Image (cartoon, rainbow, N blue to C red):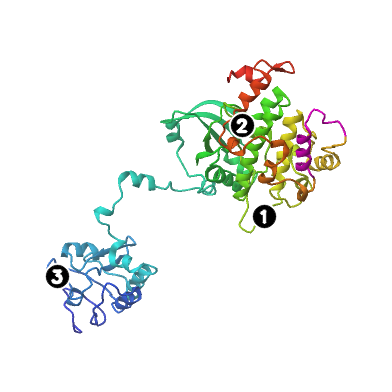
Amino acid sequence: MGNQTSTETLTCTREVRHIPRYSCSSSVSSFRKLYHNLSFSQHSFSSSSSPVPDSLLSSPCSSVRLLSFRPSSGSFYSATPSSSNGSLKSGLSAGTSSSSSTGSSGAFKRSARGRSLQRCSGSGFTSSPSRIPHASKLEEMKTPYPVTTKEAIFLPQFPIRSATCLTNRIMEERTLSSGRFGDVTRVIVAGKSEPFALKRIRKNVVIRFHTVQQVKDEAAIQRDFCVHPFLVRAVDSWQTRTHLCILTEFVAGGDLSTFWHQHGAFPEEVVKIWGLEIALALDHLHSRGILYRDLKLANTLLDNQGHLKLVDFGLAKMLGDMEKRTKTICGTLNYMAPEILQEEEYEASADWWSFGIVLYALLVGKYPVQPADDHTQMCEEVMRHRYIDCDTTQHSLLTPAAVHLLDRILRKNPVLRLQNLQVIKDQAFFCGVKLVSVYRKLDSPFGLLRKLEGPGKVAGGRTTRLDKTNLF
């Protein structure tokens, strides 16, 4: 190709140099360098018989494409040199001149910056029919746009879903509980035979109290780390315009707190099973670097056989790889460990203190220290109170094994406190109970309670749950 180029083919302001042969394995930088020498002031293919420059046709790289910039639309178009003249016109928009040599070349460099050779070769501009996803896949890949800040801050734990779509799939039956942050409802999901529990949290309340990350951690923990027989697992989570939703399995027996207020103290044989079930659940969470931090009777649910499941991970904390302690003051006052009340750093031993309070309440029928107005006053009560005094007869109804266990767990110094499942299960109190049998739920706590006390027991003038629900 010489200095003079046919006007039917291409009009240039500078000499079009010979284009060397490049293989398909050429680097992107060489590809840019090749076209940097072509600065067009205007380009047009005026007639359908206009040939493509010989230097391009002679190139062995069949995937080379010519790129041009259409100033009116601001988008890129492509044309394959080996294609027909009609497609070449659509690629370079016949009769349209570019703004300047520098502008055209700069537009091309911006389009190629950061792209791989495969993208520059045209795979990113056109797609073969075999690569086009199915219509159902395209529908799933759609992202609601625009995404507001109120929605984006809860991603990806809470994907965005339409409330209209959820109404057709989920049918509410009755409200189980409600609070400041939201409510829990028993629901039926289309296509599923068993019921589920739907926890709905108000977005405006979460944002107002600055608990966005806390709610996201709750959904992640309950979905990914609660695969355990004594933990309530979340099967799905999403968000609407006003609420965050967590769908969990439904536990039909109610919470242990209600049963405890109706019944009072429980026999030690039943408390042994419940104690090991809670200990197994805590050990599972601790082994994965999670602090539960809200163990209490109200957060332990009962199934139809009386087995326990821990629920409500709103205060759970995921520790990092190098993080072993935390310092946040949270929990329920009469279950909080002394180190939390004293605003010191704490670890998994704080959960085992709450475990000791639960055992004390189940065995004795009351809390060792009644809840105070704030954590400062509660701290004074806890530090002043002597939980277990083995020299007195204040726990005469308990066996020595139970007194010894409570004394070892309710130690105000976390270093001296029992805080390991292997050590706790070897205590004399749990003698005769196999951990494997508890994990497999071979013994029913309700069945054992009925055998020990009978279904007609009345506590404090009120009929117990065993009579009201006819579980047996």
Residue 259 in view, yes or no: yes
Separation of residues labelled 2 and 1 (CA atoms): 29 Å
> Which residue bears the numbered disc 1?
324
| Residue position marked by numbered label 3 in the rendering | 50
Q: Look at the image and say whether residue 410 sits in the magenta stretch.
A: yes
Q: Going 77% across and 29% down the picture, which residue do you hit?
A: 364
Instruction: Pick whichever of labels 1 and 3 is earlier in the sequence.
Output: 3
Name the mark on residue 301.
2
* Residue 388 point in image, percent of width and height: 82, 37
**10 Å crowding of disc 1: few (<14), some (14-19), many (20+):** some
Rate crowding at label 3 as few (under 14), some (14 to 19) or many (20 or more) other CA atoms within 10 Å: some
Residue 254: percent from left, percent from top: 61, 27
Q: Is residue 115 above or below residue 281?
A: below
Q: Say which amino acid is labelled 3.
A: Ser
Viewer-side label of 3, 2? 2
Q: Quadrant of the C terminus?
A: top right
Residue 254 magenta: no
Q: Report x, y in % for residue 196.
A: 51, 31
Gap between marks 1 and 3 measured at Cα: 74 Å
Q: Which badge, 3 or 2, comes first in the chain's sequence?
A: 3
Which of the two residues, 217 or 251, is positioned nearer the viewer here?
251
Magenta range: 392-411
